[in-house]
Image: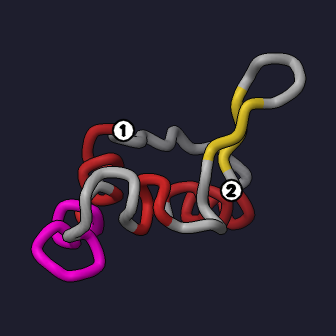
Amino acid sequence: MGILLALLSRNVTGRGQVVEANMVDGSAALATMPRLSTKTFSWSGPRGTNLLDGGCPYYDTYETKDGKYMSV
């Protein structure tokens, strides 16, 4: 949202903006879904069987040929 507003302001005033992004607040918001899911059936299985910890065939981490990793 901050980037969008800075771009709109630049179009109106012609001056750039400083956009501050608090990484801690953003990561706390993103962590809400897994934390709340532990209280429901969607995250009640053992480790490695739930939605985002390796249990879904369409969401996993793979080692690449150059020894690095990618998530799909």
Residue beneath the point at 55% across and 64% down? 5
Mark 2 Cα shell of 10 Å, populated few (<14), some (14-19), many (≥20): few
Direction from residue 22 to residue 12 in the image, left or right: right
Q: Main secondary structure of the magenta part?
A: helix
Who is closer to the viewer here, 13 or 70? 70
Which residue lies under the disc numbered 2? 10
Q: Is residue 3 above or below residue 15?
A: below
Q: Is residue 72 above or below residue 65?
A: below
**Hey, what amino acid is under mark 1?**
Met
Direction from residue 31 to residue 61 in the image, left or right: right
Quarter of image, res 38: bottom left
Farthest residue in the bottom direction? 41
Q: Is residue 60 magenta?
A: no
Q: Which residues, given as a range, are shown in magenta?
A: 33-43
Residue beneath the point at 22% across and 72% down? 37
**Hey, what amino acid is under mark 2?**
Arg
Residue 47: percent from left, percent from top? 30, 51
The reply to whether callout 1 and callout 2 are in contact (CB within 8 Å) is no
Residue 33: percent from left, percent from top? 28, 68
Q: Quadrant of the C terminus?
A: bottom right
Residue beneath the point at 74% across and 22% down? 68
The first of marks 1 and 2 along the sequence is: 2
- Res. 23 mark: 1
Gap in Å between the C-alphas at discs 1 and 2? 24 Å
Residue 54: percent from left, percent from top? 48, 54
Q: Nearer the viewer, mark 1 or mark 2?
A: 1
